[in-house]
Amino acid sequence: QVQVVESGGGLVQAGGSLRLSCAASGRTFSSYAMGWFRQGPGKEREFVAAVSWSGGNTYYADSVKGRFTISRDNAKNTVYLQMNSLKPEDTALYYCAGVRTPQETIATIPNLYTIWGQGTQVTVSS
């Protein structure tokens, strides 16, 4: 069973950058599609980005496309979310999630994911 722990959140000014990391334990990490979700104050959890188990396929929410980049290093059992040009509306608790998939698929719906971290807070000041 894979477990994940997020890190890298913090307080940043608008226009700044942060890189989130999601460290996974378990020997089957490379067979998991991974995703990042976020939940802002008073909002529902929303999809941010996802990557297939090889890293060959990625997908982004329209709100972050062109600003955020998801990547993974299976040798290090880690998924990253590079966030550039941050905006105050990006303020949220960011979660890393995983789902074991038989092929190079990507999931954008939270309920499809079976592994979740505790989240890391990102706060963007204006």
Image (cartoon, grey):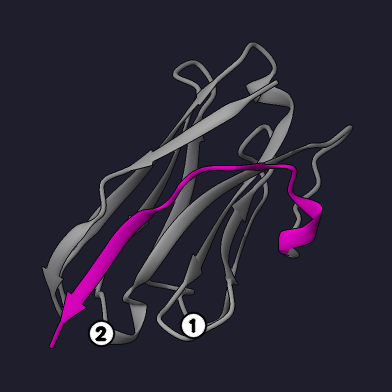
Asked whether, in this view, residue 95 is left or right of residue 15, the answer is right
Give whichever of discs 2 and 1 has the lower sequence position: 1
Closest to the camera, between mark 2 and mark 1, is 2
Q: What residue is shown with label 1? A: 63
Residue in view at x 26 percent, y 75 percent: 86
Indicate the quadrant containing the N terminus: top left, top right, bottom left or bottom right: top right
Q: Residues within 10 Å of mark 1 (few under 14, many from 20)?
A: few
Looking at the picture, tell me which residue is in the foreground, 65 or 119. 119
Q: What residue is shown with label 2? A: 88
Q: CA distance from mark 2 to mark 1?
A: 12 Å
Q: Amino acid at mark 1?
A: Ser
Asked whether, in this view, residue 119 is left or right of residue 89, the answer is right
Residue in view at x 35 percent, y 77 percent: 90
Contact, mark 2 vs mark 1 (Cβ under 8 Å): no
Q: Is residue 63 above or below residue 81?
A: below
Looking at the picture, tell me which residue is in the foreground, 108 or 82. 108
Q: Is residue 95 above or below residue 66?
A: above
Q: Position of residue 84 (x, y in %)?
A: 27, 66
SS type, badge 2 = helix
Figure quadrant of residue 94: bottom left
Residue in view at x 13 percent, y 68 percent: 12
Write the start and end of the magenta stretch as one range: 110-126
Q: Position of residue 32 (x, y in %)?
A: 71, 33
Residue in view at x 23 percent, y 71 percent: 123
Q: Is residue 42 above or below residue 92?
A: below
Figure quadrant of residue 58: bottom right
Q: Position of residue 57 (x, y in %)?
A: 67, 49
